Image (cartoon, grey):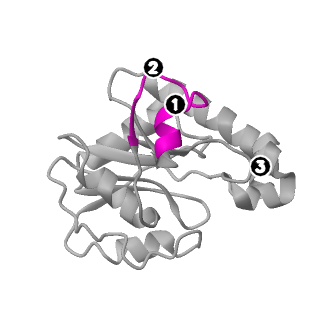
Amino acid sequence: MIFVKVPRPGRVKTRLARGVGAPEAARWFRAQSRALIRSLRADPRWEVRLAVSPDAEGLATRALPGGAARQAQGGGDLGARMARALFEAPPGPVLVIGADIPGVTPAVIARAFAALGRADAVFGPAEDGGFWLVGLGAARRAPRDLFRGARWSSADALGDVLGNLSGVRVGFADRLADVDEPEDLRRLRR
């Protein structure tokens, strides 16, 4: 499941936009999310679903590629929205990723599913201390409030969530970089 916002200037990548401008940040996010969705949809090993925001606009927009089932993210903070997506997903293992991770490829996702086969939960650590992927096995052996107290957009986000998973077997996927700040985009372009 790919968490994605409708790529509108001023609504997406706001930290990035402070350094490159809202139109450029939205252009980058639109291109990145389209490429990611198309790449992952082309692989027959999994079904790609989009969790969209804002809800009504995301369900109707043509700014995102078609062909993938869409569902509204719904209300609440990021943790509440991700927990809902994880626990209300169709049967089977489920991965939730963001749309702003340029290093995600089908091979990376396959390795994450393989890690999930040996664990109850899997995380893809981000270079900034957060995480770009979270997944649960078919049994969904994790507390529904697994994101409780997470300090989002900080170097503590992954550690905060891991602290909520006592007794849960945790595995890890590839460590990747997301694009949140102008320096992240400059590094990517280099």
Depth check, front residue: 28 or 178: 28
Q: In the structure shown, which secondary structural element does the residue marked by tag 3 occupy? A: helix
Q: Toward which corner of the image does residue 93 lie, by quadrant?
A: top left
Q: Which residue is mark 2?
A: 42
| Mark 3 residue type | Leu
The residue carrying pointer 3 sits among few (fewer than 14), some (14 to 19) or many (20 or more) residues within 10 Å by Cα, namely some
- Estimate the x, y position of residue 15 in percent, counting from the top left: 73, 61
Image depth: mark 1 or mark 3 in front: 1
Q: Residues within 10 Å of mark 1 (few under 14, many from 20)?
A: many
* 29 displayed left or right of 119: right
At mark 2, the secondary structure is loop
From the top left corner, tell me how far across and down residue 149 is, in percent: 41, 79
Q: Which span of residues is magenta-colored?
A: 56-71
Q: Quadrant for the C terminus, please.
A: top right
Q: Residue at x 68, y 44 (%)?
A: 8
Contact check, label 1 and label 3, Cβ < 8 Å: no
User: Contact (CB < 8 A) between labels 1 and 2?
Assistant: no
Q: Observer-nearest residue: 28 or 165?
A: 28
> Is residue 102 found left or right of 162 in the rendered image?
right
Mark positioned earlier in the residue sequence (1 or 3): 1
* CA separation in Å, label 1 and label 3: 20 Å
